[in-house]
Amino acid sequence: MNQKHDHANQILSLLENNESINSLKVAQTIGINHQELVGYLLQLEASNYIITEGLKKDQLFLTEEGNTILNSQSGEYEIYQKVPEGGISMTDLQKQFGIDQAPKQKQEQGEKKEKQAEDPKKKLFDQGFGNAKKMGYIKMDKGMISKVANDLPDKIKQELQSFNEIKLGSPQAKLLIERKLASISTIKYFEIKKGVKYSPKFREQFAALTTEQLLSGEWKDCDYKSINLNAEGEKISMGNLHPLLKVRKQFSQILIGLGFEEMPTNQFVESSFWNFDALFQPQKHPARDAHDTFFCSDPELSEEVDNTLRDKVKTMHQTGGVGSIGYQYEWSHEEARKNILRTHTTAVSSKMLYRIAQQYKEKGYFPKKYFSIDKVFRNETLDATHLAEFHQIEGVVIDKNASLGQLMGIIREFFREIGINKLWFKPTYNPYTEPSMEIYGYHPVLNKKVEIGNSGVFRPEMLAPLGIPEDVNVIAWGLGLERPTMIYYDIRDIRTMVGPEVKVETVRSNAFCVFESK
Ligand code: PHE
């Protein structure tokens, strides 16, 4: 049996023949401090062995000074004892206490006087002397101090020796409090009674049945805690999706629902060829400037693309084809091989279109709908609405019958799914689409028209070199992921969505994104 059980058993056996017991007395009997006892009481009460009633009472306590006197003697008694038979002068008596009478002139200086008054020895002496007179130990006659009687007892010490019998409010108590030898403070204690499961012997309640208990048969004698079926389970901390990932997931579900397949986007470093050249974007186009694009230094150049494809793209840029005269400039192979961080997901689409064209050669024509959502990079100055890396969502429809009307229809359907119903299309220019349209949507929260995407019909100058048959049309649109995410989660500064600025707590508590479609 451990000590915990010993004490519990002691408490229980004290209760065996008593209706109720007082915790202060129990602590005294067992010989532990009250606070420790309270710990055992709580445990016994929780197992219904006992019930307790919390009570309060004022109690007299010895102060530190009171204790000192109890262990030695009172100040007045010390003085009394030092007074000899024939009496003594004040100066001599003070000397006995090691109090040096300071020279007169020094005493006159105000500052020193104060110091003298602060001397703790003197203060104690004065106090003792005053009390010795008051208590009738000594008397003063013509400057001589003498004892009132011989063999007087130390009355205050005697009072303190019977301190436990002193009642609150009695003259003795008042005297001790006045002399700061005792003080009153409220103490909390308990009245202890038997509980419904009372037994004079404590049996520990086990939280779980163990293999050992089963094997040894000990379980037959064990008590078990009842199971709290209302207890809440422990919260499991697990991974949570970042707001961007939640919205991304939502977008991909919408697109999958509309019959789109996801394109592989796992390649941040792309050659200029797929990002620009294959998209019929001239090599002198301002977007290719280092101000807008991140170029890679190692490896600086990408691997060769298929020669035939390369030459077809080159010809289209230089002299044109499919009814176009091209851009009429000297196309640089080296420029096209420059590695960059892809600036848009249309680089993914151009590669996919080439792959589809290859498949057409084997399997013949089939319509296809693709989408991608992933990171792109632009050399932007960072501010509350711009980052150098962000995400794009892109949709591509490859279909013989694809038209501008169909593009507008698909875009309407897509935005309707994310709760944007009012759309406007504005003509714009992209090197790789014709016609091209900026997409504007009415934002109910911002209460205004906002640009939400870009779109168009891919130009024959782009599609022909990739090998897409002339009668097959490809329509596409793209938009950023960050803006809808910021609107949805009310994020004011785009920079708080990345790196150490991300607040883990909001990531945990943010709702799973569900767009309301009407
Ligand atoms: N690539 C364009 C952009 O970065 C978006 C776009 C995609 C436009 C497809 C037309 C067609 O803004």
Image (cartoon, grey):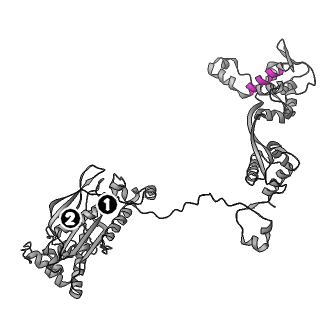
Q: Nearer the viewer, residue 413 or 512?
A: 413
Ligand 1 sits in quadrant: bottom left
Residue 339 is at least partly visible in this image: no
Residue 55 is at least partly visible in this image: yes
Q: Residue 60: give its label.
A: none
Mark 2 and mark 1 lie on one chain; the one further toward the N terminus is 2
Q: Nearer the viewer, residue 18 or 5?
A: 18
Q: Residue drawn at (86%, 52%), measured in percent from left and top?
A: 13
Contact, CB < 8 Å: mark 2 with mark 1? no
Q: What's the distance in space between the residues labelled 2 and 1, CA to CA? A: 16 Å
Image location of residue 167, percent across then percent down: 83, 30
Query: Which residue is the site of mark 2?
Result: 408
Local secondary structure at mark 2: helix
**Is residue 235 found left or right of 265 in the rendered image?**
right
Q: Amino acid at mark 1?
A: Ile
Query: Which residue is the site of mark 1?
Result: 418
Q: Main secondary structure of the magenta part?
A: helix
Q: Amino acid at mark 2?
A: Met
Magenta range? 121-133
Image location of residue 338, percent across then percent down: 22, 74
* The C terminus, quarter of image: bottom left
